[in-house]
Amino acid sequence: MITFTGVTKRYPDGTVAVDDLTIDIPEGTLAAFVGPSGCGKTTSMRMINRMIEPTSGTLTVDGKDVTKVDPVKLRLGIGYVIQSAGLMPHQRVVDNVATVPVLKGESRRSARRAALEVLDRVGLDPKLAQRYPSQLSGGQQQRVGVARALAADPPILLMDEPFSAVDPVVREELQNEILRLQSELRKTIVFVTHDIDEAVKLADMVAVFGRGGVLQQYADPAFVLSNPANELVSEFVGADRGYRGLQFFEANGLPLHDIRQVAEGDVDQLQLASGDWALVTHADGKPFAWINAEGVEVHRNGSSLYDSTIGGGSFFRPGGSLRLALDAALSSPSGLGVAVDQDGRLLGGVRADDVLAALRQQRRVPKVG
């Protein structure tokens, strides 16, 4: 349990970075601190491990006032992940990961052995252990940063915008990795981000900060989206908060509609009426593009298939959320979202109106934060 009680951080020039913050973060909870730049979210997080000292108020970890705990001892029990990983460039990956266990007195041999296990846990090939950080991709470096934070098995992790420096595809992979690890380990995590989508996806609780370090709302993500506390929160979460909220509704049981499909090698023989669409599949049966009558004609004249198609849209896997189902339907030129199984093979199509019908059945009053 991490508890802020009336915590304020005021600098000598009078600037207030955090103003009278009072929240509880229960054990095993992932709490996301979000808000615009300069709103105090990172300052609040750094007070937990005394990288920044509070001016007033009380901040406790497991009932102990952090200001009365030796800062070195405190930090050795708290994992810390920052943007761009912050790895030591002169050390190999395995020694970067083993840093905290060695500082806590574990033998280097034992710490390295454990480091290899942690690297595997975060989805990295142990063969990378002998490389230096500069020899890794940005996403790999961030995974090493997470592994280093987990190496000593701390009960608390602090994560300061850890994925903001990587591209969107890698960022999504890392977010999914955090969800998987948290489902297994149930750490208490404070995750700082300026991305409301990232906060909503990862967090059990979301704290929205405003200018001057004032907490605007602290609640579960679904409640923040459906019931923003004030205009400031509403503006921050965005005008499309209703669409974001669809991720909290399950898509199980959506009807699947027939989709006309054609193998890539048979496109020349395809006959389509104006306005009709067919789904083109690879030799292994996996769909990858849509084509209409105009596209067929262009294809027969020798142009590539992709020159004659209008994007394939997003794939949807049943068991996901209504947001994913609606996205598949809306991004498809045919109006049918492509539903595939875990192997990527076609199951059928989903319609936007079926998603809205499912939403009507599942709609509920959100829990008060």
Image: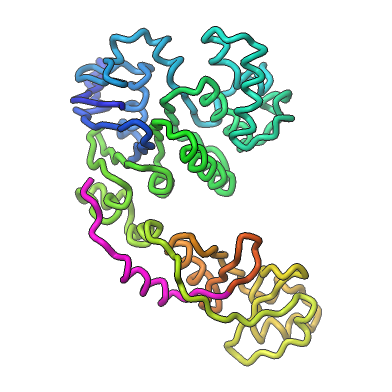
Q: How is the image coloured?
A: rainbow
In this rendering, is residue 266 above or below 26? Answer: below
The reply to whether the magenta stretch includes residue 65 is no
Report which quarter residue 101 is drawn in.
Answer: top right
- Tell whether 57 sits left or right of 144: left
Query: Going by the picture, which residue comes out furthest to the bottom?
Result: 273
Q: Position of residue 327 (x, y in %)?
A: 48, 65
In this rendering, is residue 235 above or below 255? Answer: above
- Image quarter of the N terminus: top left
The residue lying at 54 percent from left, 37 percent from top is 165
Q: Position of residue 6 (x, y in %)?
A: 18, 25
The residue lying at 67 percent from left, 12 percent from top is 109
The answer to which of 7 and 220 lies nearer the viewer is 220
The reply to whether the magenta stretch includes residue 360 is yes
Which segment is the magenta one? 348-369
The residue lying at 51 percent from left, 31 percent from top is 83
In this rendering, is residue 112 above or below 144? Answer: above
Looking at the image, how many numbered discs can be counted on the residues?
0
The answer to which of 186 and 272 lies nearer the viewer is 186
Q: Position of residue 368 (x, y in %)?
A: 21, 49
- Image quarter of the C terminus: top left
The residue lying at 57 percent from left, 88 percent from top is 275
In this rendering, is residue 220 above or below 251? Answer: above
Q: Position of residue 345 (x, y in %)?
A: 65, 67
- Tell whether 303 sits left or right of 328: right
